[in-house]
Image: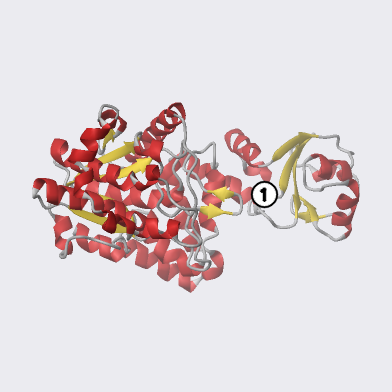
Amino acid sequence: MKLSEELVWRGSIKDKTFTDDKYLDQPHALYLGVDGTADSLTIGNLAILMLLMRFVSAGHKVFMLIGGATSLVGDPSGKLTERNLKSVEEIRHNTESIKKQVEKIFNDNVSGHPISFVNNYDWFKDIKLMDFLRETGKYFAISDLVNRDFVQTRIDELGDGISYTEFSYTLIQGYDFWHLFKNFGVDLQIGGSDQWGNLLSGVSLIRKKENAEVNALTIPLIINRTTGIKFGKSESGAVWLDDKMTTPTMFYQFFINTTDDDLEYLVKAYTFMNKNEVDELVSRHKAEPASRIGQKELAYQVTKIVHGKNSADLAVKVSQVLTGQIPLTQLSQEEMNGLKQEVTFKQVDNNGSIIDILVDVGLAVSKTDARNLLKSDSISINFNKIDRENLTESDFLNGLALIKKGKAFKDSALIAL
């Protein structure tokens, strides 16, 4: 399957400035820009990283622009209020962290040296304001900029207005495309669909300034089709690619909880599985949906792409323990250490008070709450319901026990003699 056909099949094309998708089958130098608003990307960003890796595998030259300069300004796209400006030091830390994160993902999943990094701070730090206004600003009409979606959103009755600083962001991004075109031969920029206006700025600038044909491509924003919420959010916040911010097990669990309606859509976007493999997986899942074959495969494949096979295997084992599929005794020491990263761990006496333990590990807010939980049949030890108030030696397996409140994955604690 050619790249153009694959991207159509995966649903990876939203907006484009070219008319024939076969344009993507020709060799290009392309880039994606990412700002350092945090020191990690999220699974929302991962969708477009997957697209980049597909371009690399098809033989294209790929650049990632780390926005050391644009991060200092702040992208107004999708925001109703002004971003808080970050310090140069914080942006430098964030951009370096993102670069290492992306480099690892690419090196682990695409052979060779697949991606080049550039930082727009390297060229913007020496540009004088008058030169920028004369050589770039004159190519942008205020009437066009004011009609951009991100500006209209900010100046309507729900918005908070827009400063000149954020208003200028799209000019800076347009200049980036021009700089990469002039110095590296980049003729294609990709981004999320919320970046369409910013991508057009670069296309327009190069066509006017250089009388050259360049193009832009966006992918649809990944959303939860049930809730309509932008993908990458959970009850506890964003799902990060950094394993210290979202552990591999919680990362795995996020995808395990995918609805049946979203399954095929997310497998296409977030894995390297080909059409035959996806069709077979979907068919197996539909034949036995209760077993969640599809969600397990999706979660494992995405966790392996981001965190590596060892971490994906560990996430599976820890998840199986916390959902009662296997006992604690089947965990290796490394897997037990992984479990301790997910739940509270506490040393106890073999005849200790369950009431006190529930409060100490945060499963109850008070002793009264703990007693009520026991009376309502909400507490289990190693998945056996209990209503007594003291531990017994038989509660432990090789000196360990998993105490849970209800069925929620994270409402668990590991106790040890």
Q: How many marks?
A: 1
Type of residue at label 1? Lys
The foreground one among 114 and 43 is 43
The location of residue 417, given as percent across then percent down, is 80, 34
The location of residue 408, given as percent across then percent down, is 68, 55
Compared across the picture, whether 308 is left or right of 314 comes to left
Which residue is tagged 1? 410
The location of residue 395, given as percent across then percent down, is 81, 45
Q: Quadrant of residue 200?
A: bottom left
Above or below 48: residue 348 = above
The foreground one among 74 and 251 is 74
Compared across the picture, whether 286 is left or right of 20 comes to right
Compared across the picture, whether 13 is left or right of 350 comes to left
The foreground one among 162 and 216 is 162
Which residue corresponds to the image point at 86% horizontal and 55% vertical from the top-left?
A: 374
Which residue corresponds to the image point at 33% horizontal and 45% vertical from the top-left?
A: 168
Can residue 9 be seen from the camera position used here? Answer: yes
The location of residue 266, given as percent across then percent down, is 42, 60
Q: Dot 1 surroundings within 10 Å: few (below 14), some, or many (20 or more)? A: some
The extreme left residue here reads 211
Which residue corresponds to the image point at 39% horizontal and 60% vertical from the top-left?
A: 152
Which residue corresponds to the image point at 8% horizontal and 50% vertical from the top-left?
A: 211
Above or below 240: residue 263 = below
Which image quarter holds the N terminus?
Answer: bottom left
Compared across the picture, whether 223 is left or right of 274 comes to right
Can residue 107 be seen from the camera position used here? Answer: no
